[in-house]
Image: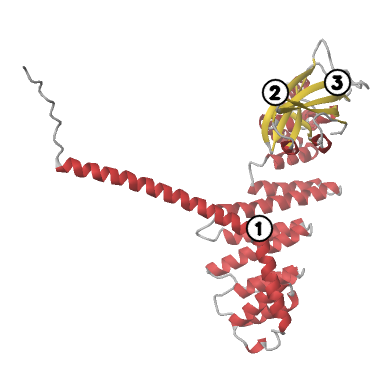
Amino acid sequence: MIKEKTKREPEITLKQELQGYIKTAGISFLFAVIFTVLLSFHSRSEMIKNLYSNRADRVQIEQQIAKQIVNHADLTSSLTGKNYAVCINVGDLYYAAGDMQRAEYAYHLALEKSPNGTFAAHQKFATVLITQNKTKDAEEVINDVPDINSLKLVRFKTRTYIILGDKYYSESKFLKAAEAYEKANYYYTRLKKRDRYIHESIKKRIVSSYIEAASVIIEKGGSSSDAARFLKKALKYDPDNLNIKYRLALIYADLDPILAIDFFEELMQKIPQEIDYLAFGKALIKAANMMDIQNNQIQAKYYRYRIHSLDLYTQNKVVYKNDINIDLKSLIVKKIFFTYQLRNTYKIKNVSTEDIKKLYVEFVLKKDDKVKQTVVVPCASKKLPLFANDTEGRRLDVVLGSKIFTKRELQHYTVDIYLYKDPKFKTLIGSHIIPQKSYYSSKTRVSPHL
């Protein structure tokens, strides 16, 4: 018999064996590092979450402890002979207990005894003054400290100016708030290491203050040029803010129509569904008339052509929110096997002065701001227009929520309603929640209004 030759496996050298062990150990170590890092991130996020969730409880406990301590004895009676650290700690106790007058006294003593180059007492003293609405005194405390090349001083002035600005903002003194925030921004930019989120927070405060200041002027019928000036300051800090540009476009439609047109043209490319095209058209008319006076016929013809093209554009693509009324007339919550359906009936009316020959309504069912279902209903066409000032309106039946599984979930759902002629230019016309009465039975009719 012929014996089959057995295949001999290649011998593994010591070097190869060591390389295998090292490779296995390396992979294990890598997985261990990744697991440890992920675990540390999770632990850190949980710790931060617990800190924020328990913050109110901790503050309340600290306040109760501080009150018990300060009610036991007057800690300020012999404070003049104490050192800086004791004065600071006593001030902190009274501040936590809500006794601002004694906290102010303790911090003032600490400020007088403050070591050179230390500004903790200055910040605490200014803060307690701001808390008591003594904003002018607080500003004097900040201004009395001369600017020197000191990281501690920069931090002190940055933080205190932010607190001062927040106080002014809460009192609707928006220009004073903006001034304080700008000073905070000035000092913060002097830091070599800056936190991007803190810097953005300061700039957002400045922008918001100037926008609110401009809004107050417009509401009170003040100078439009002043409002525009404040908005331009806000735009300097947030050059891509479309809200500011739109406000400026509306103001400049009267002050400087040519500049307004520049703003409107940019906004038309980015937020066409949110523009007041009537104001845009008026700015074009004024600009054309100005060019006629200056004998610039070429530019005047361009602006008049732009008016005509804008009219065609709005007729074919734009839906004005105030031209359409939509009311929720009835809602039925019906259980089908293990799911619920929302059968809504709406009434849509054209309250404008012209017939609408093209219109779609989009109903968006959302749960906690996440879109769950979208239903589009055509409601006007050339053959069946939505007539102007039609008192009866048109009925729209919509079925939503085919994937809702429990009654409890219903309270988290909302329905947003959009109108459009072109899907690129949608106008939000209303939003409503699922009425609470509908939770109690599988088939309930209600008649809420948007």
Tell me the CA gap for discs 2 and 3.
22 Å
Residue 185 visible? The answer is: no
Residue at image point 57% right, 66% down: 154
Nearest the viewer among 25 and 49 is 25
Amino acid beneath label 2? Pro
Q: What x and y, as percent, mark residue 72? A: 72, 83
- Mark found first going from the N terminus, 2 or 1: 1
Q: Secondary structure at mark 1?
A: helix
Q: Quick one: quadrant of the C terminus?
A: top right
- Mark found first going from the N terminus, 2 or 3: 3
In the rendered view, tell whether residue 9 sits above or below residue 119: above
Nearest the viewer among 161 and 29 is 29
Q: Nearer the viewer, mark 2 or mark 1?
A: 2
> Residue under circle 1?
182
Colour mapping used in the image = secondary structure
In the rendered view, tell whether residue 382 sits above or below residue 112: above
Tell me the CA gap for discs 1 and 3.
54 Å
Amino acid beneath label 3? Arg
Residue at the far left in the pictured view:
1
Residue 207 lies left or right of residue 290; in this view the side is left
Residue at the far top in the pictured view:
383
Q: Nearer the viewer, mark 1 or mark 3?
A: 3
Residue 394 lies left or right of residue 73; in this view the side is right
Residue at image point 42% right, 48% down: 35
Name the quadrant containing residue 100: bottom right
Residue at image point 47% right, 50% down: 39
Q: What x and y, as percent, mark residue 247? A: 75, 41
> Residue under circle 2?
423
